[in-house]
Image (cartoon, helix red, strand yellow):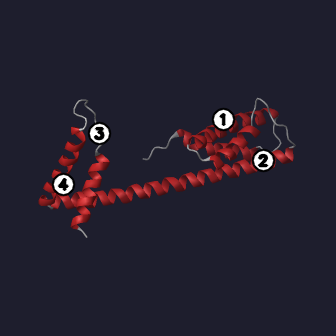
């Protein structure tokens, strides 16, 4: 059974809280809503600022300011309802775009994995090419280790080895 992270449900809960706020509720509920939305949008705004996605940072930063519980902006009930609906919509859009990005990344990883499997099978079936691969990898490692013989450094050679494999594979499969 696939486990889901408990924090994954927070945006959905916030959407429901925003939609419930349309009803006439006690003042403490709106204070609670301010705090929850304030914290959530602060996290989103901070992450977007860190990723240099300034337009999204501006959107969620503005929401963060509007829902500030320390210095609340007092608005009429009608305006507050409209804002709650807009914020719920923005969070839904955020969820949709994040899910689309995750799907694209997953598809790309699967595509790369399939290509790597094909390349690995090719080398397993061709011992002569396997020897050429080993020579290329040794050559690459010698070249990079020779420059740093005085200090022992560990290289992350995996991407370079994959490039070497792809180059040799393409050479034999043109």
Q: In the image, what residue occupies the spot 74% across and 51% down?
A: 86
User: SS for tag 1?
Assistant: helix
Q: Examine the rendered structure and indicate whether residue 21 appears above or below residue 123.
A: above
Q: Which residue is mark 3?
A: 155
In the shown orientation, is residue 22 left or right of residue 17?
Answer: right
User: Mark 2 near mark 4, Cβ–Cβ under 8 Å?
Assistant: no
Q: Residue 39, which numbered label?
A: 1
Q: In the image, what residue occupies the spot 32% across and 49% down?
A: 159
Q: Position of residue 102 (x, y in %)?
A: 49, 52
Q: Nearer the viewer, residue 118 or 130?
A: 130
Q: CA distance from mark 2 to mark 4?
A: 61 Å
Of discs 2 and 3, which sits in the foreground? 3
Q: Residue 83, which numbered label?
A: 2
Upstream in sequence: badge 3 or badge 4: 4
Q: CA distance from mark 4 to mark 1?
A: 53 Å
Q: Nearer the viewer, residue 15 or 98?
A: 98
User: Mark 1 near mark 3, Cβ–Cβ under 8 Å?
Assistant: no
Q: Position of residue 106 (x, y in %)?
A: 44, 54
User: Mark 3 near mark 4, Cβ–Cβ under 8 Å?
Assistant: no
User: SS for tag 2?
Assistant: helix
In the shown orientation, is residue 163 left or right of residue 135?
Answer: right
Q: Residues within 10 Å of mark 1 (few under 14, many from 20)?
A: some
Q: CA distance from mark 2 to mark 3?
A: 52 Å
Q: Examine the rendered structure and indicate whether residue 129 appears above or below residue 19.
A: below
Q: Residue 133, which numbered label?
A: 4
Q: How many marks?
A: 4
Seen as rendered, the residue at the extreme right is 76
């Amino acid at each position: 059974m696939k486990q889901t992270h408990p924090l994954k449900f927070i945006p959905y809960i916030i959407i429901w809280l925003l939609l419930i706020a349309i009803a006439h509720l006690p003042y403490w509920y709106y204070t609670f809503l301010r705090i929850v939305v304030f914290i959530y949008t602060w996290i989103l705004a901070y992450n977007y600022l860190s990723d240099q996605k300034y337009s999204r940072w501006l959107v969620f930063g503005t929401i963060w300011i509007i829902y500030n519980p320390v210095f609340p902006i007092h608005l009429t009930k009608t305006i507050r309802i409209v804002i709650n609906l807009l914020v719920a919509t923005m969070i839904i859009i955020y969820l949709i775009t994040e899910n689309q990005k995750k799907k694209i990344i997953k598809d790309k990883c699967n595509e790369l994995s399939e290509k790597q499997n094909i390349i690995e099978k090719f080398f397993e079936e061709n011992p002569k090419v396997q020897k050429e691969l080993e020579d290329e990898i040794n050559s690459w490692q010698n070249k990079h280790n020779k420059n740093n013989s005085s200090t022992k450094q560990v290289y992350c050679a995996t991407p370079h080895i994959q490039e070497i494999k792809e180059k040799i594979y393409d050479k034999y499969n043109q």
